[in-house]
Amino acid sequence: MKKKYKKKKIKTGVIAASAFGITATVVLAVVLLTTGIKEDTSKTDDILAGAEKIPEPSQSAALEQEPGESKSAEEETVPEEEAALTEGALEKAEAMEEEGAEEQERAPLLNIPAWTNTGSVNMRSGPNTESEILTVLGRNARLVLKYEEEGWGAVSFEGKEGYVSLDYLTREEPTANGLTVVIDPGHQRKGDSTPEPNGPDSSTMKARVTGGTSGRTTGVMEYELTLDISLKLREELEARGYTVYMTRDTHDINISNMERAQYATSVGADIAVRIHANGVENSSVSGALALAPSSKNPYISDLAGESQSLGKCILDAYCAATGMNNQGVVSSDTMTGINWSTVPVTILEMGYMTNPEDDVNMEDAAYQEKMVQGIADGVDDYFGF
């Protein structure tokens, strides 16, 4: 319980009354003597006796008044603790007043849905381009727009609060864009060495599917990494308005490279994006590259130009988002999954699982978000979004 303090009033009235009484008595005595008025001495004695009855100022009262100071009865001494509390209350009141003023100046609350209208949108901690980047948003990311402030929107996204430039926001809900993407997560748990044709009418035979490489540092298998990224990529592309199909969504499947390409044709895909990771003996090699058919491909030379363009768009955006070393688009005419394709196709080799840094990065959740955003941005770039 807080201790209550009573205000102490300085008893200056008593001091004044005492001083007045003495002065009045002396003056009256002088007047009586000087005017020669004859009064009964007993009355004079009574007056003097009355003056003696007026109490003298107490020592405690005198101590409360500094020499040469005159304090009114309204002045009071406040205990130090009470003064500190009063000062704190004043500061709090001033802060509340300032906050209230800021609230009045701020634009009215909206709390409405909004979407990003492009990819790689920075969500920042403050309404300016110098504030910290909290996260990078893809196209059609759904936000809650709380209010607008000097060209910026105060937003919330997946539990984070921040600001996005109004140039990159729209209040119109996105609709499907009519485009279909097939994602092929490379490999599977068990390889299948049964031979299949390397291309239509080809006499060259290759194994249906292999198990892939593995992380030298993390121990993660390539088929695990490719499915993890592909599932996240599907979600991101669907959010951007694409219809997405996947050749597999489990490890326990047996689907050959030829069959993966044929699946893309069967669902009416506009493009096929094959997700892989690299591996070589030299652990110092790192970076990402894309594979696409050349103009001399014996099976799909007519798709070479679009496939090369698709590979470049995805690779460039991917490396920009992740900081991965860009090894460029490499022509390949020996990949069964490419040679059987009937739509523009590319293989993204996301990094080297045999390189410690690439391997660890590709298993980091925050880094994977960048990987997914980069691939999706590349798909957007290819289609001109």
Image (cartoon, rainbow, N blue to C red):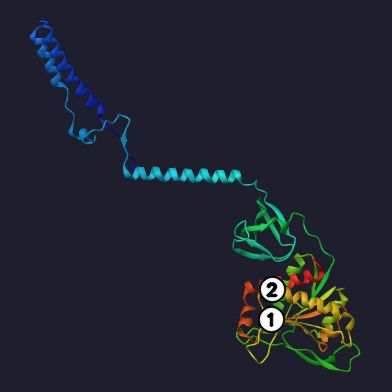
370 to the left or right of 48: right
SS category of the residue bearing label 2: helix
Q: Read off the residue under disc 1.
A: 224
Residue plotted at (25% across, 28% down): 12
**At label 2, which amino acid type do we have?**
Ala
Percent from the top left, x then y, of residue 268?
87, 73
> Residue 298: x percent and y percent?
89, 88
Q: Nearer the viewer, mark 2 or mark 1?
A: 2
Contact, mark 2 vs mark 1 (Cβ under 8 Å): no
| Residue at the left extreme, as displayed | 41
Answer yes or no: is residue 158 visible. no
Q: Residues within 10 Å of mark 1 (few under 14, many from 20)?
A: some
Looking at the picture, how far across and down is residue 29, in whole percent? 13, 13
Q: Hey, which quadrant is residue 232 in on the image?
A: bottom right
Tag 2: Cα neighbours inside 10 Å, few (<14), some, or many (≥20)? some
Identify residue for label 2: 320
